[in-house]
Amino acid sequence: MNLADTLNLECMCRTLSPQRLREQLETTPELAGMANALAGSHPHLFSQTAVFLDPAAHQTLARTIAAIERVMALPAYQQSALAQASAIARQDWGPVGAFMAYDFHIGVNGPRLIEINTNAGGAWLNAALARAHRDCCASMQGMFDAHSDLGRMEQVFIEMFQSEWRSQRGAQPLRTVVIVDDAPQTQYLAPEFELARHAFERHGLQALVADARDLVWREGALWHPALPADQCIDLVYNRLTDFDLSDPAHAALRSAYSAGATVVTPNPRAHALYAHKRNLITLCDDAQLSVWGVSAEDRALLHAAVPHTTPVTAEAADALWADRRNLFFKPVAGYGAKAAYRGDKLTRRVWAEIVAGDFIAQALVPPSERLVEVDGTPTRLKLDVRAYSYRGAVQLLAARTYSGQTTNMRTPGGGFSPVVVLPIVPEQNCTQPPNETPALPFEGAQPCLGRPGAAA
């Protein structure tokens, strides 16, 4: 094992202080009480432990994302992806999509891409969480800031939205931002809507959180009754999972987007190009990528990082069922792990629904694990690593630790975890004598409670 694996599997060090988390979340008087409210309503949202990432894995992850975005910028790729999308996705107003996220399992052969998301949740919360963990001790600060400038993360996010605005509106001033979802106050990550709203306001923008059903399309502009009567909506930060805006309840937003009257990010085009599950099949098609002119280096990165993915068809059903224990099945239009199944857990009834539906089969990539303490007991949880990115550059890394088939925020000891990218160290420093605790890359945190083999 490398040092990151050793720490993840043998160290239960806790670096989260509730007080420091409160300071990072409650940045204005209006946000007072958020930390206590989250502790009551979302008891497993935040993990007390950080996840460690090998520097080579971090480099591969970043290079893979950059390679994917180079492929997705190719006219031939875009023509292929958009040919299968709804007409609204073929409109190109300029924005590429805020808060892209690439989810990876970290295997023995490096990062393996599980899926790509638009309108990925958690970035605002994870930035606050990482700062709280970082502040546990002086030496942790340098390790966190080595891969993300956490002190400027709010500015980085705001600049992303400004870039999205300029790509469609040029030098016109951005005045209003509306964060949109269905019944936003009932959404699981609703607290981060408020974090985002206050961040926009701190940067001089008028911002509000709104239900998409309350938007009004009138006189060639998008309006909301909570805004001044003469102030239309300039930009929509879109958190809807109606990716092509086809729900009749979203007709006003659809009309505004179709007319180019409002900047919408992320938008139907971004989802069709990046996040539709069919795109994973394309990224595995080395022959097609070669025809499109993708470099040998980028094809090698994708071959190593993207698990083989194929459509589920009636013709392939028997072969896929026979190999189901090595596969993971996902609906092509799914999100949030809904209706996603490990093949070894399938029943014949569910399999019939999968074959009749529109699904992909992805080679199963076991997740790595993190040792945590749950009620005094060393417990191994699964983990994935999410890279929030913009225009191919990683902004922030976060992990999700969980038990069960798919990620969730309901596992004791689990939840969002910050990612610490370890410094490059000589290989011999990764090996510990038997019965000794691995040397921690920081001082001043709670002592490591784990021992080699404790959770074996």
Image: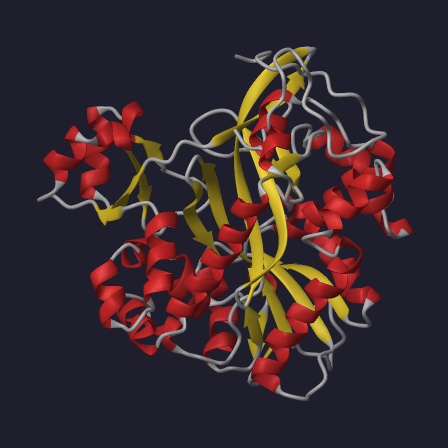
Displayed quadrant of residue 428? top right
| x, y percent for residue 377 | 65, 10
Vertical arrangement, residue 179 with respect to residue 361, above or below: below
The residue lying at 70 percent from left, 10 percent from top is 376
**440 w.r.t. 171: above or below:** above
Of residues 58 and 120, the one nearer the viewer is 58
Q: Check the image and name the residue furthest to the bottom.
A: 171
Q: Percent from the top left, x then y, of residue 186? A: 62, 43
Is residue 238 visible to the viewer in this orientation of the structure?
Answer: yes
What's the residue at 57%, 13% (across, down)? 453
Q: Of residues 96 and 258, which is closer to you in this image?
A: 96
Q: Position of residue 20 (x, y in %)?
A: 85, 38
Q: Is residue 37 above or below residue 279?
A: above
Residue 187 visible to the viewer: no
Q: How many marks?
A: 0
- Which corner quadrant of the image does residue 446 belong to? top right
Location of residue 248 in the rendering, given as x and y in whole percent from the top left corner: 43, 62
Residue at 12 percent of width and 42 percent of height: 316
Residue at the right extreme, as displayed? 29
- Residue 64 placement, left or right of 357: right
154, 141: nearer the viewer: 141
Which sits in the foreground, 331 or 113?
113
Figure colour scheme: secondary structure
Which residue shows up at 61% across the image and 85% down it?
169
